[in-house]
Structure formats: C-alpha cells, structure tokens
Image (cartoon, rainbow, N blue to C red):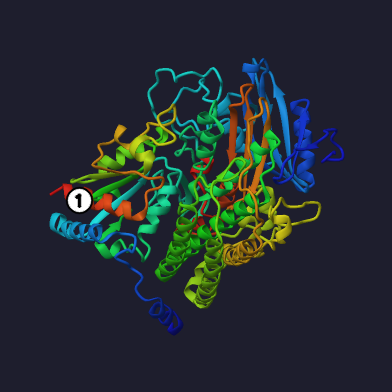
Amino acid sequence: MYLCDDISIEFTRQPGMGAPVWRGRADSGAHLRSFADSARRTGARISAIWGSDLRKGGGGFRLHCVFGVEAGHAWLSLDLSADAPSFPDLADIFVAANRMQRATRDMVGIAIEGGDQRPWLRHGGWPADWYPLRHDAGAVPEFANEPTDYDFVKVGGEGAHEIPVGPIHAGIIEPGHFRFSVVGERVLRLEQRLGYQHKGVERLFIGADLARGAKLVGRVSGDSTCAYAWAYADAVESACGVEPPPRALALRALMLERERVANHLGDLGALGNDAAFAFGLTQFFALKEQWVRVNQALFGHRFLMDCIVPGGVAGDIDADGLTAIVEQCTTIGVELAKLRNLYDEHSGLQDRFATTGIINSDLARELSLSGMAARATGILLDGRAHRQGYTPPPPYAALGVRPATDERGDVAARVAVRFDEINESLRLLRQIAVSLPVGAIRAELAPVAGGSGLGVVEGWRGEVVVGVEFDVEGRLARVHPHDPSWQAWLALEHAVLRDIVPDFPLINKSFNLSYSGVDL
Amino acid sequence: MIPLLRHIFRTGILTEPSQDVEAGAQRELDRLQGEILHVLGRALTIREVDAGSCNGCELEVHALNNPYYNLEGRGIKFVASPRHADMLLVSGPVTKNMQNALLRAYECTPDPKLVVAIGDCGCTGGVFGESYASCGKVSNVIPVDVTVPGCPPTPLDLLRGILTAVARQK
C-alpha cells in the first residue's frame, strides 16, 4: 500500500490487535523529506521521532519517524551510516519535529542537517560528545554537573522584559522552565525549556526483560500509566505475534477509561481552583478520591499501575466488581451533571474560561496536536473512534465511541470536552461491564529475537506511542515511549499569546501536560 | 448562589478519621497533629519539590488536599516558596538536571529544614536508580529526616511521614 500517491514507499500493515500501523522504509534523507512533505500536504501529523543504534549487529544507526495519517500511523525508518550518521531537518515541514530531533541527537548522537542545533535534554549533566543510547556508551566520563545556559529567543523593543519561571514552580507540579517575554501584563512570547525530569528512562530499557520493561513504561508518566502499559503491550505483542484474549482487551479498555475519568475529574477541579473557585477543587477531588478508591478495591492500585502487562492484564474482575463499576458510573454521572450546571451558571468562572488561551484548528494541525486539546479546537480525531478510512482497534471498534469536540479552542472548550469525555467514558464503562467476554485474561508470550513493533493508544491527553525493538537474544534493545505532550507543549506556547501573565496558570492547567513523559 | 450553597450543604463533611486507618493509628495521627502545634506553635508549612518523579507521587500529594484527608484542616499547608516552608516534601529520583535546583531550594529553607523523601524513587532511587541522568535517592543530594516508601505512597502514608518528621523535632 502507498500512503502518499506521489512517493514510492510501500507500506505493509504490522500484525497484531492494536491500532493500525503501517511500516515502510525510506532510501535516503531526501526520500524521507519528500514523504514528510507530501504527507503534510495531505493533512498528516508527526507523531514521534527517535533513533536507535544497530552497530552491535553490524549495521549503522536508524532513524524512526511515525506519522499520523488517515489510515492510522505510518512508521517510516531510515538507515544511517555507522560513522557519520545524520538526517535532514524536518522542522520546516512539521514544527513539532524540532524538539524531537534535538532529543534524538542528544540521546543517540545522530546529527541534524541544519535547523535548530540547541541541546534539548542535555543540560550540562554529561559531555556533549557522549551519547547515552549508544550501545558502547559505557560509564559517563569524569565530568562536573554544571548547568549550561540556554539560548532563549530574545524579544527586544521598548518596555519588553523577561519573566523567568521555574524549574521549581509555585504549585505541586513537575519542574520545567518557562521564559515569558512581556510588555506590562501582555505576553509577547513564551518559550519553554524542559528536560529537568530527564532521568534516563530510555537507557534503562536497553537489555531489560519484558517484565522490567512493563514496570518502567508504566512510570514514564504516572498519570497515564494505563495508556503507556497498553501501548507497550501492543508493540510487544505485535513483535511476538501474540494476540491477547478478548477479555483482556476489554479489561484494558475498562482501565484506560477509568484512568481518563480520574484525570479529567482532577483537572476539572483544578481548573475551578485556578479561577479562584475552591468549591470546584473540593467537589471534584472528592469524586476523584471515590473513583480511585474503587480502583484500589478492584485492581489493587489507586492509579492502576502494573495492571496491564504484555499478553493481557495482571488481574481479573468478578461479577460483584462489575456491579460496583456500573453503580459508581451512575452516582458519578449524577454528581457530574449537577457540578456541570454549577460551573456553567457561575458567571465569574465562565468569565475566566471563555476566550482565554485560544488555539484554532489550523494551528492545532500545524503543530500536529492530538487528543483532548485538538478535539477542543473542533478536530474530530480520536484513536478510539471510527473515521473515514480508519477502524479503531478492539474492543473500541465494537463500542462505537463518540468523540467529544468543541470548536471554540479556549479554556472553556477544554473544560467542556473534559465533561463530555467523562460522560462518554462512563457510558463505555457500563457497556464494557455488562458485555465483558468470558475466558482467559492473559496469553503466553515469548520474546522474538530481532522483532519490533509499535503501539498507539488514545490516552486521556492524546495519543501515546511506544516503539519496541528486541535484540538477537530476545531482550529489549530499544524502547521509545512518546507522550502527546511533545506536541501540546507547543500549543501552550501559542495559546498564551493573546492573554496576560495571570491567565497563564489557568491556560497551563487547561492542557495539564506531562513533563516526565517528554523528558524521559 | 443558592444552588451552590445547597450543593455544599448536601455534600456535607466528607473528612473522615479514615475508615482505612485502624483505631490505634488514628489516635497516633491525632496525637502527632497536636504535636505540630506544640513544636512549631503554628501551622506547618510544606514546599513540595518534584526532583524527577513520574508525577505519580504528585497525584497522591494532591489527594492529601481533598476533603477526605483534609490536610489544611490538620493545620498543614503547602506554600509556594521554600523561604516560607518548614519542610520540604521531595519526590525523586533526583535528576542530574534538577540537582542544583533542589540544592538551592534546600539552602533557601529556614530551620528546622525538615526533609521528607517520598516514593520508592525518593527513598531508594526506585525503578530508575542511579545513572548518567539520575542521582538516585533524595538523601544522595540533601539530608533527609523521614522516608515514605510506596509507588506511589498513599495519602495516609504521606500524612504519617509528615507528622513523624515533626514529632522527631521535639
């Protein structure tokens, strides 16, 4: 199959039960660029970029690019030389490629031909010519951890000044640095510098077994543990040619929807709080607490960590458990309707939400945005739902997911989409609970030497992508987890531009992006 | 306004001398809570520092503020600046890229400068351990008074850890 009519790259569909992935190879950097260019013109998004070192097996380096296309995802690989690996800059085609390329360069040592050359994940904690994901990297050479300056883009003009924020922020959130350029209260530019959460996750995967890999991937971004564990499981199962039993797939969806509801409930409360409506925080956090306590009672973990494993799920649920889930969906649904009414009727709250932090659908497409934030600009993109030319993976194909959208693109839209998505998830949970297939919850699985696979899951923020490669001994050679926040961080830089500095916390919370998920 | 007040009234007080805590532990919590006032003579203020976590620990720190655990009702509150804090609540592992920021936050914190390291990663380095990018456990970077293991630790474990650190100050 050719995904772009004018580019001669043949794609074949990867086996497995996960979201549809099409694999192909580019012959050269120019070939990759022409595919990217053609894909961009047909409305594709850049989903992920990473590199791997294949020199151990006698090869060179390899660059992986994943594009979100109509039929699903196109996974394009490009082989690079062992001596002087480099790849063409794609950031002029896909803006979101910029930071992913720089991270690839920092981690694997593949040069970017032109474009932005600033380091991204490396802040000075290790030497510039030492690359953690090279198989022969060894220990870090003796080196002082001295933070380097970052070359932020300067905004000039009379009265323009900078406000540096972070890495430690005022609230209980992850660290990152925001550099605002302002005139008075008006934000002229926001530039982020992330990477503070970089704890070397990708290197830990190298040589790990499947169980250790599952443990690690579930801790890439704790609030999305189900999405990562499922995407990793999809990738591993595709590589090993194993299909998890139907009951396992349904239980995975049940957990993923519970994760979505938990996070949306928390965000709705926090959004109220950031608009000085503490009532919202109290009410929604109470609902979230009730929600995660049921997780603890049924699955043994409040946030469902380590519940989804390669081959299936770790634990089963009985009839009483299913009844508890259905009953809770009803009670939470009733409370949610009341709270939504109170939010909608509160003029002070709506005044802060409406027309704040706007991004439109053109910008969302330009930035390859996915997930909740993209749907809040009116884009009907949800990996769980049918669309022209795309069939979602089981069990979603049979559930008939109705994606929530709102065309306003502001904080109010992201609030509305969260409310709608909770309601849809409650419906899905009831449906899964009453129609849960019987049978096994886990399939036997053995790693396949040299195998590889890609998993894509629609998490609560957006699409979570995990690429997996095995070495010749059947251990993990490379795992790359990709968070939807990579793209959404760019959207936040734009969303704040028409607003004033005090609106930033509210706008930031309306996206609630992961730092750990992109810093790895 | 009236629907809002009605909703608050109907919700009632959710704060529980938690059903999950056995009676003895609850008495201990109450006693420790009294000691906060005795030791500090006022509310305990905490600066939470995420020095490299997966954000799982932060989910539970947030939960401490929900009406079920009602942290502020126990005379404990989170503050924005380490200069206003009695205690640092630090999740880990401490990344190389956060090492300096954590050290500076510690230096800025006035005495008694209590430090509680939370989560398996904060206590031991956890699944991430020590590496080219990670300094591992919090105590590898700053002195730690109390550790609260768990992945992530439950809100009650966190509460117990916070109160224990205060009690040790006596």
Along the horizontal axis of the image, is A161 left or right of A8?
A: left
Along the horizontal axis of the image, is A432 left or right of A299?
A: right
Q: State the image coordinates of residue A379 (x, y, percent, origin top left).
A: 70, 58
Q: Secondary structure at mark 1?
A: helix
Q: State the image coordinates of residue B145 (x, y, percent, origin top left).
A: 23, 42
Which residue in the protein does label 1 denote? B166
The amino acid type of the residue labelled 1 equals: Val
Between A414 and B23, the residue placed more toward the observer is B23
Residue A275 visible? The answer is no
Along the horizontal axis of the image, is A373 left or right of A148?
A: right
Residue drawn at x 43%, y 44% is A175
Q: Chain of mark 1?
A: B
Q: State the image coordinates of residue A272 (x, y, percent, origin top left).
A: 46, 66
From this view, report whether residue B14 is shown above or below residue A473.
Answer: below
Between B72 and B28, the residue placed more toward the observer is B28
Residue drawn at x 34%, y 73% is B13
Between A305 and B47, the residue placed more toward the observer is A305
From this view, report whether residue A376 is shown above or below residue A40.
Answer: below
Other residues around mark 1 within 10 Å, as few (<14) / some (14–19) / many (≥20): many
